[in-house]
Image: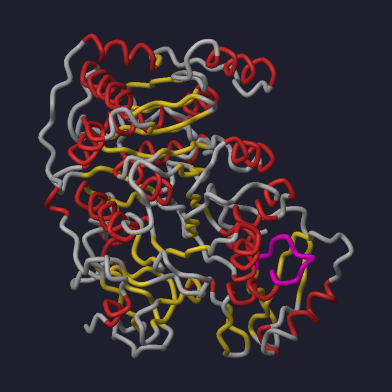
């Protein structure tokens, strides 16, 4: 394979990284704790903690786990939003040699039970607000340690007490629960502080995460991500941002949930390695409060998904913020629409840099150069030590410019799916390439362009229609707030395109939208059916659930 993308690399980016320099995430993290001890690591609800505090608290949690008999390799589930407790518990369990199992706090008991049963987790840390879900999910699982924390823990007095009072008495978000064996996080930290942390010999191939996929094709699968996988991706990302991101000088907006692989690596881990500060946003769906928080902090970097950027741009107060310090906007997790990228650049004066990855690749696989002046539509160049091939259904490499399945090989590619060898064999070839299920092409300069998910493709009279292209065209109409395109059965053409639209302009009609699309799309791609809704279903990070729309 000719690595044509290397000729497009900015001068500072190496062709290869060296994950062997760090045998585990624990070594990588502890280096940062020592190097940046007096710098602020995280800010949450007005409270900040330094790297020194993060070192102490995560060590206390690691020792606390050990005092409970939690051993190396044990799976520890984390079920909480973006609170200070998350990095404390995550880094602590990693230092104890345990495996993190990230759980969406909004899971139903059924969804949580599947993840606990499948992973064999013996310990779970949960915010009290969601303890009733854990209570209902526990029967039949291997969980023997339930550690409960309150929203205000780690915020100090009186801030923490006030937050807990508001959550429980004013917002009434804390239902009654009863888990007899439950421990409080504060008590576990105290036990750890009074005991001794026993360092654990962690092998690079040891699992660091069982990171569950979204389950869009059925029950969620646990991607086995080793310490080497994650260390590799952190080092790949660090090499990529080296010329644009200043160590210890950046304030990074972390609005996406840390339990999702994008924010986990791109925010929680990467910017700890560079000694920067993460501003944790507890609930990014509350756009007015998010904008108020942004107004209080001179942020320099923000990561997000297309729906988050779109929602911010639709908020007048956001558009009035001071963006003079903004240095980098990174979009991933789903395709960034050109119309959103253009509006972002107009509002902030900075381009929206698109990146690409998957849970199975830890997640980064391709990123655009950070000195890009304008949005180019590409998902980027393959990052250091990474190969991307475009292949047909038979697994043959396709020429540059032809659309096929995006396949990825590199040190960040997962070991496989937990206890699912057949599913692993379906996506991981003998040559080490991961079949992503995404369709795209590579241009002569090595830039990769995402076309769509293979399974979402619409077949109209034998012609391929990609929902992303339709959605991008529809979103350019000023009366559209959000849109999803799906295929629906048709007796004449097999399928036709249907769009489900959330209106910004309540007077917008289906006829106006179809006329708009005729000006931008070939006839067979133009939607034949239009449905208006008040909202669209989303994943935990804001990606539109096309599958749910097809089933509704």
Which residue occupies the foreground of this view, 120 or 272?
272
Residue at x 32%, y 78% (from the top left corner): 8
| Picture coordinates of residue 194, whole percent (x, y) | 23, 9
Q: Which residues are magenta?
A: 475-484
Question: Where's residue 138, x and y in %?
Answer: 42, 27
Residue 489 in percent (x, y) is at 66, 77
Describe residue 473's horizontal placement relative to residue 184 as left or right: right
> Furthest residue to the front?
324
Q: Is residue 477 magenta?
A: yes
Residue at x 34%, y 82% (from the top left corner): 391
Where 374 sits versus 319, above or below?
Answer: below
Give left or right: position of 469 versus 28.
Answer: right
How many numbered marks have been drawn onto this rendered protein structure? 0
Q: Quadrant of the N terminus?
A: bottom left
- Relative to 52, say whether 532 is above or below: below
Residue occupying image coordinates x 60% and y 20%:
175
- Above-or-below relation of 186 to 424: above
């Amino acid at each position: 394979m000719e690595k044509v993308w290397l000729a497009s690399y900015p001068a500072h980016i190496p062709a290869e990284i060296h994950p062997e320099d760090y045998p585990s995430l624990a070594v990588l993290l502890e280096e940062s704790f020592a190097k940046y001890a007096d710098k602020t690591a995280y800010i949450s609800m007005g409270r900040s903690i330094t790297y020194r505090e993060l070192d102490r608290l995560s060590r206390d949690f690691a020792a606390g786990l050990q005092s409970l008999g939690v051993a190396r390799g044990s799976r520890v589930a984390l079920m909480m939003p973006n609170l200070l407790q998350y990095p404390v518990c995550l880094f602590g369990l990693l230092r104890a040699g345990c495996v993190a199992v990230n759980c969406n706090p909004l899971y139903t008991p059924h969804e949580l039970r599947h993840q606990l049963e499948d992973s064999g987790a013996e310990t779970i840390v949960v915010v009290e607000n969601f303890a009733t879900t854990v209570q209902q999910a526990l029967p039949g699982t291997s969980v023997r340690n339930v550690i409960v924390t309150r929203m205000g823990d780690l915020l100090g007095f009186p801030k923490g007490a006030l937050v807990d009072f508001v959550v429980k008495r004013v917002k009434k978000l804390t239902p009654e629960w009863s888990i007899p064996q439950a421990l409080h996080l504060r008590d576990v930290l105290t036990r750890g502080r009074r005991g001794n942390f026993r360092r654990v010999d962690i092998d690079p191939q040891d699992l660091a995460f069982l990171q569950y996929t979204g389950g869009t094709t059925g029950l969620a699968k646990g991607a086995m991500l080793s310490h080497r996988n994650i260390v590799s991706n952190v080092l790949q990302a660090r090499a990529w941002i080296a010329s644009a991101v200043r160590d210890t000088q950046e304030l990074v907006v972390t609005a996406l949930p840390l339990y999702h692989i994008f924010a986990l690596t791109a925010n929680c881990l990467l910017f700890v390695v560079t000694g920067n500060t993460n501003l944790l946003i507890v609930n990014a769906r509350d756009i007015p409060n998010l904008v108020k928080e942004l107004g209080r902090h001179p942020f320099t970097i923000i990561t997000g998904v297309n729906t988050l950027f779109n929602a911010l741009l639709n908020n007048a107060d956001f558009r009035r913020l001071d963006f003079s310090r903004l240095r980098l906007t990174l979009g991933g997790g789903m395709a960034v629409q050109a119309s959103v990228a253009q509006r972002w650049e107009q509002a902030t004066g900075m381009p929206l840099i698109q990146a690409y990855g998957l849970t199975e690749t830890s997640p980064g696989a391709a990123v655009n150069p950070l000195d890009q002046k304008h949005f180019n539509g590409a998902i980027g160049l393959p990052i250091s030590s990474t190969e991307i091939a475009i292949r047909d259904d038979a697994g043959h490499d396709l020429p540059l410019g032809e659309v096929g399945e995006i396949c990825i090989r590199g040190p960040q590619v997962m070991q496989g799916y937990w206890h699912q060898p057949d599913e692993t064999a379906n996506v991981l070839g003998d040559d080490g390439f991961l079949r992503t299920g995404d369709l795209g092409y590579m241009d002569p300069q090595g830039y990769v362009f995402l076309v769509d998910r293979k399974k979402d493709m619409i077949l109209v009279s034998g012609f391929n229609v990609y929902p992303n292209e339709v959605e991008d065209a529809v979103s350019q109409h000023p009366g559209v707030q959000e849109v999803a395109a799906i295929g629906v059965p048709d007796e004449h053409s097999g399928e036709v395109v249907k769009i489900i639209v959330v209106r910004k302009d309540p007077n917008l009609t289906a006829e106006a939208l179809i006329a708009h699309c005729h000006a931008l799309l070939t006839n067979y791609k133009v939607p034949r059916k239009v449905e208006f809704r008040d909202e669209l279903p989303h994943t935990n990070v804001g990606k539109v659930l096309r599958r749910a729309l097809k089933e509704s």
